[in-house]
Image (cartoon, helix red, strand yellow):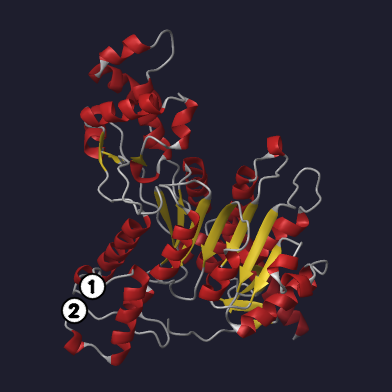
Amino acid sequence: MNQLTLEFVDDAISLSGLTGTRLKCDVIGTYYPFWWKITSGGKRANYQWNTAIVELNAATGEVYIKDTGETILGSAGHALDLKINHFGDEELLTENLKIVLVEEDNDCYDHLKRVIRRRWPEVPLDIIEGSTSENTSNIYLFNDTLEDALLKIDELELGNAIFYFDPLLSVTWDAIEKVAKSRMETPFETRTEFIIFLFTSDWFLGRNDFEALPCSPDEKTWTEGQRKSVLEADSLFGDQEWRKDILCEKPIEIKEEILLELYKKRLQRWFRYVLPMPFNPKKNQIFHLILCSNYEAGVNRTKNAYASKTLNPPYKPDNNQAYRNFIFHHPETGQYVTGRRKPLMWKLLWKIIKSHEEGICDCYCKDFREYTASLELISRTLEWLRSKGYLEDFEVKDAWGSSLHRYVLNWNSIRQKLRVDPPPRLTPLSPDEFNKTDMGKVVELIKKWKQVLAKKRG
């Protein structure tokens, strides 16, 4: 990918965008502890299950926000903070949590080491940089290319792991598939999650020396810079199939949606749920943080947390009215229950509506086990829902070539029969909207305070 010029303030990488970088770091900082508390087995297991946070583009661990002049923890910093500040805490035992930090850029790597030395002096740098076989700290630091680092990571017993791909512009599809293949041997295992950073609008607006994609598939009309950008997009998607849909004269907003949809479909070969969370750091600029998971509750919790931080309304369809509509259309389902209990058909359908990203499901979804342990009964119920029009076949084939039947909600039928609308699309928090939030008001106070302080010094 074309290299961008990096700027540093002290040891922090310098970036702008309160509604971009700062908000992104806030989302990651909220998600890491939530994810770890679940995947480590929780309090009942004394947090002893092996877990790992793998930062494949760790940067410096700190971010300097130009708009406010503040230095905050980056995602790698949040990972280290979770590990170190809770290590030995009798309530949150993190000794079995591995933190793997990979940074190829030498300048970033040197700053990262200085951040670790300053913020967490108890971390032994010589050990975490050394041989993995002799490292007993469960913190690993690699100044390697992604390919070389992945070879070393394969030697570690990670357990439940989250991999964060946070490149300056995009990650290659080869890297995505390499990690996915090494981690998921059977369809939709729940021990692996990805978070992927995608600079969506840059493909169409350009940035610095990176030229926007051309508006024609005719290679003869491309500049040399556009040719390089097309090849980078080939690496992003892992093929050239995307070209016929994106290299066209459609409005940029439409092409951004197409790009995101095509990328999601590739990720859905490996993951049940792909949640793109949009960010709007400045006018017309959009990037996405994409959570890829096979665990319903984690995705739903993350989506709700993002919505609360970005002024997106919560999704609250009327359960009681929808259930009355369901029974009206299917009174025969009442014979399977007594009293105030509800039939399994309804329970699974409502679970999919409320908690499954894009309404995608299959018989192995873990949250269905709340209602029955019978895989056969779940399969029959899903097929019943399909026969009644609530579900339809999900057309994306999985990466294993399995015969697993995947379904997706048929929202036309749900609207018609249940009078339930789908959840609204997530929209990014714009810089103007940010000023309405509590954080925005605090930031404005900080700016005014700095102005007053500057005047006094003057």
Give the residue drawn at x 36%, y 38%: 362
- On the image, the x and y values in percent for residue 212 come to 32, 81
Q: Nearer the viewer, residue 92 or 104?
A: 104
Q: Is residue 45 left or right of residue 257?
A: right
Please say whether residue 318 is visible from this viewpoint. no
Q: Could you say whether the residue bearing mark 2 is in a helix, strand or loop?
A: loop
Q: Nearer the viewer, residue 74 or 274?
A: 274
* Displayed quadrant of residue 428: bottom left
- On the image, the x and y values in percent for residue 314 come to 45, 42
The image shows residue 20, relative to residue 232, as above or below, that is above
Please say whether residue 423 is visible from this viewpoint. yes
Count the numbered circles shown: 2
Tell me which amino acid carries mark 1: Arg
Q: Are marks 2 and 1 in contact (CB under 8 Å)?
A: yes
The image shows residue 80, relative to residue 131, as above or below, that is above
The N terminus is located in which quarter? bottom left
The residue carrying mark 2 is 217
Give the residue drawn at x 41%, y 8%: 338
